[in-house]
Amino acid sequence: MKVAAIIISSLKNHLDQMKEVAGYMWEKGWAEATAGNMSIDVTEKLMATGSTSEIKEIFASRPFLNISFPGLANHFILVTFAGARMRDLAKDPLSCVGLIKINAAGDACQAGYFRELLTDVKPTSELMTHLAIHNFLANNSFTEKSILHGHIHELVALSHIKEYKTEKKINELLWSMHPEMSLFLPEGIGYISYMKPGTDKIAQETVKKIKKHPVILWEKHGCLSIGVSLNEAFDRIDIAAKAARQFFYSRNAGYIPQGLTSRQFSELKKESLKRDQ
Ligand code: 2HA
Ligand code: ZN
Protein backbone atom coordinates (compact mmCIF):
# COMPACT_ATOMS: atom_id res chain seq x y z
CA MET A 1 0.00 0.00 0.00
CA LYS A 2 1.31 3.50 -0.79
CA VAL A 3 2.12 5.71 2.21
CA ALA A 4 -0.77 8.12 1.67
CA ALA A 5 -3.17 5.18 1.51
CA ILE A 6 -1.89 3.77 4.82
CA ILE A 7 -2.33 7.14 6.52
CA ILE A 8 -5.74 7.68 4.98
CA SER A 9 -6.92 4.33 6.26
CA SER A 10 -5.54 5.08 9.78
CA LEU A 11 -7.41 8.37 9.79
CA LYS A 12 -10.62 7.12 8.21
CA ASN A 13 -12.83 7.89 11.23
CA HIS A 14 -11.48 11.43 11.51
CA LEU A 15 -11.85 12.10 7.78
CA ASP A 16 -15.39 10.69 7.87
CA GLN A 17 -16.25 12.99 10.74
CA MET A 18 -14.83 16.02 8.89
CA LYS A 19 -16.96 15.09 5.90
CA GLU A 20 -20.09 14.72 8.03
CA VAL A 21 -19.66 17.96 9.99
CA ALA A 22 -18.73 19.95 6.86
CA GLY A 23 -22.09 18.86 5.42
CA TYR A 24 -23.90 20.13 8.52
CA MET A 25 -22.04 23.47 8.36
CA TRP A 26 -23.04 23.94 4.74
CA GLU A 27 -26.66 22.92 5.32
CA LYS A 28 -26.95 25.32 8.25
CA GLY A 29 -25.72 28.19 6.06
CA TRP A 30 -22.70 28.63 8.31
CA ALA A 31 -20.11 28.04 5.59
CA GLU A 32 -20.85 30.24 2.59
CA ALA A 33 -18.31 30.13 -0.26
CA THR A 34 -14.95 29.23 1.33
CA ALA A 35 -15.95 30.14 4.88
CA GLY A 36 -15.15 27.88 7.79
CA ASN A 37 -12.30 25.58 8.68
CA MET A 38 -11.60 22.66 10.98
CA SER A 39 -8.73 20.67 12.43
CA ILE A 40 -8.10 17.57 14.53
CA ASP A 41 -4.94 16.66 16.45
CA VAL A 42 -4.48 13.06 15.26
CA THR A 43 -1.07 12.38 16.87
CA GLU A 44 -2.30 9.67 19.24
CA LYS A 45 -4.19 7.91 16.49
CA LEU A 46 -1.17 7.82 14.15
CA MET A 47 1.13 6.67 16.97
CA ALA A 48 -1.29 3.90 17.91
CA THR A 49 -1.43 2.60 14.35
CA GLY A 50 2.35 2.92 13.92
CA SER A 51 2.03 5.03 10.75
CA THR A 52 4.29 7.87 11.92
CA SER A 53 7.55 6.41 10.59
CA GLU A 54 6.23 6.06 7.04
CA ILE A 55 4.60 9.43 7.05
CA LYS A 56 7.67 11.44 5.90
CA GLU A 57 6.96 10.71 2.27
CA ILE A 58 3.79 12.71 2.03
CA PHE A 59 5.45 15.92 3.19
CA ALA A 60 7.00 18.60 1.02
CA SER A 61 10.66 18.89 2.06
CA ARG A 62 10.67 22.54 3.16
CA PRO A 63 9.05 23.74 6.41
CA PHE A 64 6.55 26.42 5.39
CA LEU A 65 6.15 28.27 8.64
CA ASN A 66 8.13 29.20 11.70
CA ILE A 67 6.16 28.81 14.89
CA SER A 68 6.77 28.38 18.58
CA PHE A 69 4.45 25.76 20.00
CA PRO A 70 6.51 23.41 22.19
CA GLY A 71 3.36 21.58 23.30
CA LEU A 72 2.93 20.43 19.69
CA ALA A 73 6.42 18.92 19.27
CA ASN A 74 6.11 15.89 16.94
CA HIS A 75 2.36 16.34 16.59
CA PHE A 76 0.26 15.68 13.49
CA ILE A 77 -2.79 17.79 12.76
CA LEU A 78 -5.42 17.24 10.10
CA VAL A 79 -6.52 20.63 8.79
CA THR A 80 -8.62 22.10 6.00
CA PHE A 81 -6.95 24.02 3.17
CA ALA A 82 -7.26 27.76 2.58
CA GLY A 83 -9.95 28.26 -0.03
CA ALA A 84 -11.57 24.86 0.57
CA ARG A 85 -15.36 24.86 0.41
CA MET A 86 -17.23 23.00 3.14
CA ARG A 87 -19.71 21.80 0.55
CA ASP A 88 -16.82 20.21 -1.40
CA LEU A 89 -15.32 18.73 1.76
CA ALA A 90 -18.68 17.08 2.44
CA LYS A 91 -18.27 15.18 -0.84
CA ASP A 92 -14.52 14.61 -1.08
CA PRO A 93 -12.47 15.33 2.06
CA LEU A 94 -9.09 14.38 0.56
CA SER A 95 -9.27 17.29 -1.90
CA CYS A 96 -9.86 19.76 0.95
CA VAL A 97 -7.78 18.46 3.87
CA GLY A 98 -4.06 17.99 4.52
CA LEU A 99 -1.83 16.91 7.38
CA ILE A 100 0.47 19.29 9.27
CA LYS A 101 3.58 17.86 10.87
CA ILE A 102 5.32 19.80 13.66
CA ASN A 103 9.04 19.24 14.19
CA ALA A 104 10.66 17.89 17.37
CA ALA A 105 11.40 21.37 18.73
CA GLY A 106 7.85 22.60 18.10
CA ASP A 107 9.22 25.55 16.13
CA ALA A 108 8.52 24.64 12.49
CA CYS A 109 5.90 22.77 10.56
CA GLN A 110 5.40 21.21 7.17
CA ALA A 111 2.26 20.50 5.23
CA GLY A 112 1.54 17.09 3.76
CA TYR A 113 -1.00 16.28 1.07
CA PHE A 114 -2.94 13.17 0.28
CA ARG A 115 -3.10 13.95 -3.42
CA GLU A 116 -0.05 14.85 -5.45
CA LEU A 117 -1.70 17.54 -7.52
CA LEU A 118 -2.45 19.54 -4.41
CA THR A 119 1.07 20.49 -3.35
CA ASP A 120 0.54 24.22 -4.04
CA VAL A 121 -2.33 24.73 -1.63
CA LYS A 122 -1.89 26.21 1.84
CA PRO A 123 -3.55 25.37 5.15
CA THR A 124 -6.46 27.50 6.35
CA SER A 125 -5.89 31.22 6.88
CA GLU A 126 -6.82 30.63 10.54
CA LEU A 127 -3.96 28.15 11.01
CA MET A 128 -2.33 30.25 13.74
CA THR A 129 -5.46 30.09 15.89
CA HIS A 130 -5.84 26.34 15.32
CA LEU A 131 -2.20 25.64 16.25
CA ALA A 132 -2.23 27.96 19.25
CA ILE A 133 -5.35 26.23 20.60
CA HIS A 134 -4.02 22.71 19.94
CA ASN A 135 -0.82 23.75 21.74
CA PHE A 136 -2.86 24.93 24.73
CA LEU A 137 -5.04 21.80 24.76
CA ALA A 138 -2.01 19.50 24.58
CA ASN A 139 -0.11 21.40 27.30
CA ASN A 140 -3.09 21.24 29.62
CA SER A 141 -4.11 17.62 28.90
CA PHE A 142 -7.55 18.55 27.62
CA THR A 143 -9.49 15.67 26.07
CA GLU A 144 -10.68 18.03 23.31
CA LYS A 145 -8.71 17.52 20.09
CA SER A 146 -11.08 18.96 17.48
CA ILE A 147 -11.57 22.59 16.45
CA LEU A 148 -14.36 23.98 14.28
CA HIS A 149 -14.82 27.48 12.87
CA GLY A 150 -17.79 28.79 10.91
CA HIS A 151 -19.82 31.89 10.23
CA ILE A 152 -22.75 31.27 12.55
CA HIS A 153 -24.99 34.09 11.34
CA GLU A 154 -27.43 33.92 14.27
CA LEU A 155 -24.61 34.67 16.73
CA VAL A 156 -22.77 37.06 14.42
CA ALA A 157 -26.02 39.02 13.99
CA LEU A 158 -26.23 39.40 17.79
CA SER A 159 -22.67 40.74 17.83
CA HIS A 160 -23.81 43.58 15.55
CA ILE A 161 -26.33 44.77 18.16
CA LYS A 162 -25.05 47.32 20.66
CA GLU A 163 -26.92 45.83 23.65
CA TYR A 164 -25.21 42.43 23.30
CA LYS A 165 -21.59 43.40 22.69
CA THR A 166 -20.27 42.12 26.02
CA GLU A 167 -19.69 38.57 27.24
CA LYS A 168 -22.02 39.19 30.17
CA LYS A 169 -24.90 40.60 28.13
CA ILE A 170 -24.76 38.09 25.32
CA ASN A 171 -24.63 35.14 27.72
CA GLU A 172 -27.51 36.44 29.83
CA LEU A 173 -29.55 36.55 26.64
CA LEU A 174 -28.48 33.11 25.39
CA TRP A 175 -28.98 31.42 28.78
CA SER A 176 -32.42 32.94 29.07
CA MET A 177 -33.49 31.86 25.57
CA HIS A 178 -32.71 28.13 25.79
CA PRO A 179 -32.58 25.79 28.81
CA GLU A 180 -29.97 23.59 27.09
CA MET A 181 -27.49 26.48 27.21
CA SER A 182 -27.00 26.02 30.97
CA LEU A 183 -26.40 22.31 30.53
CA PHE A 184 -24.12 22.36 27.46
CA LEU A 185 -22.43 25.73 28.05
CA PRO A 186 -22.71 26.48 31.78
CA GLU A 187 -19.84 28.99 31.55
CA GLY A 188 -21.38 30.63 28.51
CA ILE A 189 -19.61 31.52 25.28
CA GLY A 190 -16.45 33.63 25.15
CA TYR A 191 -16.75 36.98 23.38
CA ILE A 192 -13.90 38.66 21.51
CA SER A 193 -14.35 42.18 20.15
CA TYR A 194 -13.62 42.62 16.46
CA MET A 195 -10.12 41.79 15.31
CA LYS A 196 -8.72 41.17 11.87
CA PRO A 197 -9.27 37.48 10.99
CA GLY A 198 -6.26 35.17 10.63
CA THR A 199 -3.87 37.21 12.77
CA ASP A 200 -1.56 36.14 15.62
CA LYS A 201 -3.42 38.58 17.86
CA ILE A 202 -6.80 36.91 17.42
CA ALA A 203 -5.07 33.55 18.01
CA GLN A 204 -3.62 34.76 21.32
CA GLU A 205 -6.90 36.29 22.52
CA THR A 206 -8.81 33.13 21.60
CA VAL A 207 -6.41 30.89 23.52
CA LYS A 208 -6.86 33.04 26.64
CA LYS A 209 -10.61 32.39 26.56
CA ILE A 210 -10.78 28.78 25.42
CA LYS A 211 -9.92 27.37 28.84
CA LYS A 212 -13.21 28.57 30.26
CA HIS A 213 -15.38 28.75 27.15
CA PRO A 214 -15.52 25.89 24.61
CA VAL A 215 -17.29 28.23 22.17
CA ILE A 216 -15.89 31.63 21.26
CA LEU A 217 -17.72 34.32 19.29
CA TRP A 218 -15.54 36.61 17.20
CA GLU A 219 -17.50 39.84 16.90
CA LYS A 220 -18.88 40.48 13.38
CA HIS A 221 -17.15 37.36 12.02
CA GLY A 222 -18.00 33.89 13.38
CA CYS A 223 -17.55 31.23 16.04
CA LEU A 224 -14.84 28.83 16.99
CA SER A 225 -15.51 25.77 19.09
CA ILE A 226 -13.58 22.84 20.56
CA GLY A 227 -14.77 19.30 21.26
CA VAL A 228 -13.60 15.80 22.06
CA SER A 229 -14.94 15.12 18.57
CA LEU A 230 -15.89 17.45 15.74
CA ASN A 231 -19.48 16.44 16.39
CA GLU A 232 -19.20 17.71 19.94
CA ALA A 233 -17.67 21.00 18.71
CA PHE A 234 -20.61 21.27 16.31
CA ASP A 235 -23.18 20.50 19.05
CA ARG A 236 -21.82 23.24 21.26
CA ILE A 237 -22.12 25.82 18.49
CA ASP A 238 -25.53 24.48 17.51
CA ILE A 239 -26.95 24.95 21.03
CA ALA A 240 -25.78 28.59 21.23
CA ALA A 241 -27.08 29.27 17.71
CA LYS A 242 -30.48 27.80 18.63
CA ALA A 243 -30.74 30.14 21.62
CA ALA A 244 -29.99 33.13 19.35
CA ARG A 245 -32.46 31.91 16.73
CA GLN A 246 -35.26 31.66 19.29
CA PHE A 247 -34.62 35.26 20.25
CA PHE A 248 -34.81 36.41 16.63
CA TYR A 249 -37.95 34.34 15.91
CA SER A 250 -39.81 36.06 18.74
CA ARG A 251 -38.52 39.48 17.67
CA ASN A 252 -39.39 38.83 14.03
CA ALA A 253 -42.94 37.94 15.10
CA GLY A 254 -43.10 41.38 16.70
CA TYR A 255 -42.77 40.28 20.33
CA ILE A 256 -40.12 40.72 23.00
CA PRO A 257 -39.35 37.21 24.22
CA GLN A 258 -40.03 36.52 27.87
CA GLY A 259 -36.96 34.32 28.41
CA LEU A 260 -36.58 31.92 31.33
CA THR A 261 -37.65 33.36 34.68
CA SER A 262 -34.93 33.66 37.32
CA ARG A 263 -36.46 30.71 39.20
CA GLN A 264 -36.39 28.53 36.09
CA PHE A 265 -32.83 29.64 35.42
CA SER A 266 -31.50 28.95 38.93
CA GLU A 267 -33.11 25.50 38.88
CA LEU A 268 -31.11 24.74 35.72
CA LYS A 269 -27.89 26.15 37.19
CA LYS A 270 -28.26 23.79 40.17
CA GLU A 271 -28.78 20.90 37.77
CA SER A 272 -25.63 21.72 35.78
CA LEU A 273 -23.59 22.08 39.00
CA LYS A 274 -24.81 18.63 40.09
CA ARG A 275 -23.72 17.19 36.74
CA ASP A 276 -20.24 18.64 37.18
CA GLN A 277 -19.74 17.13 40.66
O1 2HA B 1 -11.56 29.70 6.27
O2 2HA B 1 -13.65 31.46 7.60
O3 2HA B 1 -12.03 33.12 8.87
C1 2HA B 1 -12.16 30.89 5.91
C2 2HA B 1 -12.57 31.65 7.11
C3 2HA B 1 -11.62 32.60 7.65
ZN1 ZN C 1 -14.14 32.89 9.22
Image (tube, helix red, strand yellow):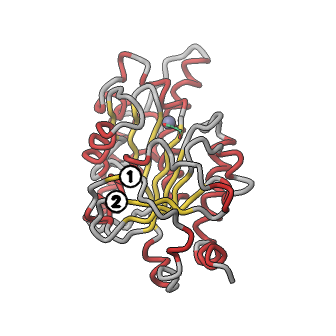
Q: Residue at x 40, y 45 (%)?
A: 215
Q: Residue at x 64, y 77 (%)?
A: 9
Q: Quadrant of the N terminus?
A: bottom right
Residue 80 is left or right of residue 137, and the answer is: right
Residue 90 is left or right of residue 253, and the answer is: right
Taking depth in this image into account, of 134 and 151 the one nearest to the observer is 134
Seen from this angle, which residue lies furthest right?
A: 91
Residue 13 is left or right of residue 276, and the answer is: right
Taking depth in this image into account, of 260 and 166 the one nearest to the observer is 166
Residue 246 is left or right of residue 107, and the answer is: right
Q: Looking at the picture, does residue 95 appear above or below residue 255?
A: below
Neighbours of disc 1 within 10 Å: few (<14), some (14-19), many (20+):
few
The image's mark for residue 65 is 1
Toward which corner of the image does residue 263 lie, by quadrant? top left
Q: Position of residue 225 (x, y in %)?
A: 44, 48
The residue that label 2 is drawn on is 108
Q: Residue at x 47, y 34 (%)?
A: 222
Taking depth in this image into account, of 115 and 71 the one nearest to the observer is 115
Seen from this angle, which residue lies furthest top?
A: 254
**Gap in Å between the C-alphas at discs 1 and 2?**
6 Å
Q: Looking at the picture, does residue 10 appear above or below residue 211?
A: below
Q: Residue at x 29, y 37 (%)?
A: 201
Q: Amino acid at mark 2?
A: Ala
Q: Looking at the picture, does residue 191 appear above or below residue 111?
A: above
